[in-house]
Image: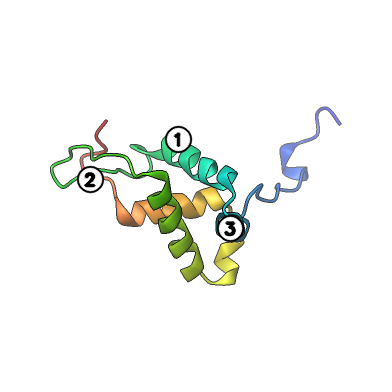
Amino acid sequence: MPGTPAKSVPAPSPWRTGAQLLRQLERGDEGAVEYIKGVYDATESGLWCYTSRKHVKLRKQPPETMRADVVAYLRKLPATQQKVRAAELLVRMWQIRWPCPPDGCCI
């Protein structure tokens, strides 16, 4: 209904949870790899930084390496954490691996 305050609308459930993404990757679903690449592209140099210690960009990860890294990370998470939105889990994984330097991310 028009004019309904947003706070009265229940929060949407994740479109793709970590558990769903893991199952799709284990099945070899190419759409799951494309999802990872999209989240990677949208969040790099803002939420995490794929850089060397000298703040120089490295080559992008190949899709198969990305897939293997995500599968390994998601398998280690407890079932309760796997229920979280997949994009949040991916960003968290990359933030741990490639945190932004104190003076900000390079572009």
Which residue corresponds to mark 2?
Answer: 101
User: Residue placed at 51% from the left, 51% from the top?
Assistant: 88
Which residue corresponds to mark 1?
Answer: 42
Q: Earlier in the sequence, mark 3 or mark 2?
A: 3
Question: Mark 1 touching mark 3, by CB under 8 A?
Answer: no
Q: x%, y% of residue 32?
A: 56, 47
Q: Is 13 above or below relative to 1? A: below
Frontmost residue, 86 versus 4: 86
Residue 84, labelled with which disc? Answer: 3
Question: Mark 1 touching mark 2, by CB under 8 A?
Answer: no
Element marked by disc 1: helix
Q: For the image shown, how many numbered marks are present on the structure? A: 3
Q: x%, y% of residue 96?
A: 34, 57
Q: CA distance from mark 1 to mark 2?
A: 19 Å
Q: x%, y% of residue 85?
A: 58, 52
Classify mark 2: residues with Cα within 10 Å, few (<14), some (14-19) or many (20+). Answer: some
Q: Nearer the viewer, mark 1 or mark 2?
A: 1
Drawn side of residue 8 relative to residue 21, left or right? right
Classify mark 3: residues with Cα within 10 Å, few (<14), some (14-19) or many (20+). Answer: some
User: Residue placed at 28% from the left, 45% from the top?
Assistant: 100
Identify the amino acid type marked 2.
Pro
